[in-house]
Image (cartoon, helix red, strand yellow):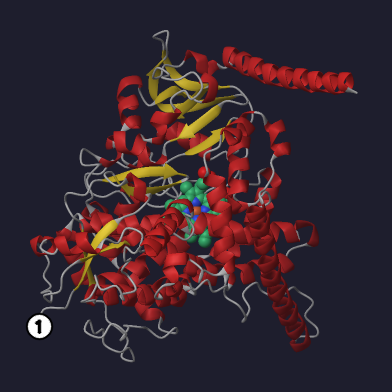
Amino acid sequence: MLYELLLACLLVGTALSLYILSTFLLLLLRQALSPLRHLRGPPSPSFFLGNLREMHDQENTNLVVRWEEQYGSTFVYRGFMGAARLMTTDPVAVAHILGRGYDYPKPDFVRDNLANMAAGEHGILTVEGEDHRRQRKILTPAFTSAHVKSLSSIFWAKAVELRDIWLEVASSRSLAAPSDPFHVAQTPQVAKDDLRTRAFARTSSVLPNPFSSFKPGKATSRRNHTAKLSGSSMSTPPSSPVRVDVLAWFARATLDVIGEAGFGYRFNSLAAAAQKGDEKTGKSENELAQAFGVIFASARQFRVMTILQAWFPELRRFRRAGTAEREARETMRRIGMSLIEQRQAEATKEQAAAAAARPDDKSTPAVHATAGRDILSVLVRSNLASVPSQRLSLDETLCQISTFLSAGHETSAAALTWTLYALARAPDIQARLRRELRDVPLPPSSPPSSPSAPSAASAIPEADSDTVGAVLAHPYLDAVVREALRLHAPVTSTMRVAGRDDVVPVARPFVDRRGRACGEIRVRKGDIVTVPLQAMNKSREVWGEDAEVFRPERWLEGGGGQESAGKPGRGQKRAGAPGLWGNMLTFLNGNPLNGNRACIGFRFAINEIKIFLYVLLRDIEFSIDPTIEIEKKINVVTRPAVKSEPHMGNQMPLNIRRVVPEQ
Ligand code: HEM
């Protein structure tokens, strides 16, 4: 018996060693055969991790620009076990790679990672080839300009809710009082709770605690800072600025938005956070939000096994979900299924009603009908209207819900946060934008915006598309949003793998290790390619010497106005910069004929950001303590952290103060 056991162990051990050895040998072989071995690149500081550690901190060290200066726009860096990965900032090469999405799919380990991070195995973010083409076609009607505009009232209502919470916080006179909902008193029990909420803020990126960085002492000690703000044409009441973690609040606001606009589901996470006491334990969080928090947190935990699984796919068979994770997935499935069933019932009813109204008309009903406007409703209708062989399966539809959440929630929260950060650091620009936004006429039926009465929201009736239209088309707002998204892309880089041997054209010849000038990049099937989206957005060749400067005016220099925004402005050399929106890569780029992997939700995100900025900036002034150094931390999405407060996790402490217009 013992002998058999030992023999079995020996066999398993030998099989495992052979598997690991063969994978490693294959890697060495692939390295030896890949044409990338001829390219220049930085030295690798670690055998196992290559340059990955440096890459992780690239946003704070200007790494890609430094590498570019040293090795040209096309070079290699090292990944796990020293594997050479291509990095190029060459616009022609990038256009070639991104324009052939199905020839350059996402690497297997990236897809596995995305699937684990709640996007699911069958969601549009994860699938490739024909499945992707089919899914993209069915999802497209839900993301058209007209449909996204019809969701504006949801963005608007959430922006007003957040504005009112912040106005309340800003006008609070008793922040240090123990009874105040925003105060965390340091009794032993509360201190324990505080630790718990802070840990929650660090680990659960879906629902960070907006109060986690709130420090009454610090807020009051910084009272004088906002007085230094220059350039504001608004006279401010004598209230003190109050420090809030805008990232955490935006995470909640955008979660509420994507829940309602994405699949008609109310997370109510803003309201939950604003309620006294509940924020300490997180118990008031909605169960779906909690479930996502569990999945996100566990997917983002650093585990050696996760790295091994990326390398040795066979090990993924031994992946075991803990009880909390299993329960979370069951909750997601149960709620998701019920949302889909509701939508399907509505859509079938609509179809029947349409058929009854037009008994002779056998054609399928139009995608846009009267019922639910949320993306899931449109998707379900679009699915029903497709030929059966092209339809999404139930599992595929279910995965889209988690995809919307993982792709459309934290990206938008980060984008809004970085925009406010840029504006807080540029008070003149903020003041001009506020002035101009206050001049956007409100419809006669709207109550006047009254800063002294936060609840008097400057709400617009849903039907008032004029105001929404004016906000979305506002030239300076558009320029500010473009500039913020250019300099602070929430997704720093993306990765692809060559699906076949290829010759990639370049605009800028480069020199290889042997000193030869190369006018093209040769790649072999299986070679990994990294496209540094953020670095390309800041390219001096494209944007000029002030590429690193936040200067929204650059978008108006082509003559001003919406029609010129996004087109080359005077003095700008933007030709050749590939990008879906505004010649930048923030939302990627794609080609409908061969894999359009560009962000399908870009209009959703832009409208959401503009409406939030409009509502918030009219009544609130944002500033930042100049002694605070903000760093960028990359964990799929690029989020801020305070350099001197690493224990606080991701946060963006800004000071807020209510503003009133000059009389
Ligand atoms: C400022 C906010 C956003 C940014 C910066 C952003 C950026 C991106 C980027 C860079 C990609 C390509 C990823 C890759 O292939 O490597 C992407 C894909 C995607 N985004 Fe967004 N996104 C944002 C908001 C949204 C929103 C609000 C939604 C949905 C409501 C959304 C849905 C998606 C989906 C479904 C994909 C996958 C598209 C495909 O593969 O066909 N995104 N996004």
Q: Residue at x 26, y 84 (%)?
A: 449
Q: Residue furthest front?
A: 188
User: How many numbered discs?
Assistant: 1
* Spot occupied by residue 232 in the image (x, y as percentages of width and height): 12, 66
Judged from the image, the secondary structure of the residue bearing numbered disc 1 is loop
Relative to 635, is 163 above or below? Answer: below
**Residue closer to the observer: 333 or 16:** 16
Going 12% across and 73% down the picture, which residue do you hit?
234
Badge 1 local density, few (<14 within 10 Å), some, or many (20+)? few
State the residue in front, 404 or 34.
Answer: 404
Q: How far across and down, in percent of the image, does residue 389 sit?
A: 80, 57
Residue at x 41% of width, y 32% of height: 55
Residue 73 seen in the figure: yes
* Residue farthest toward the top in the current orientation of the protein: 514
What x and y, as percent, mark residue 217?
Answer: 21, 61
Residue closest to the far bottom: 445
Which of the pair 16/100 is nearer the observer?
A: 16
Q: Quadrant of the N terminus?
A: top right
Q: Amino acid at mark 1?
A: Gln
Pointer 1 residue: 663
Residue 2 vertical placement versus 633 (above, below)? above
Quarter-wise, where is residue 18 in the image? top right
Q: Is 492 positioned to the left or the right of 341 in the image?
A: left
122 versus 248 height, above or below: above
Where is residue 243 drawn, in percent x and y? Answer: 25, 63
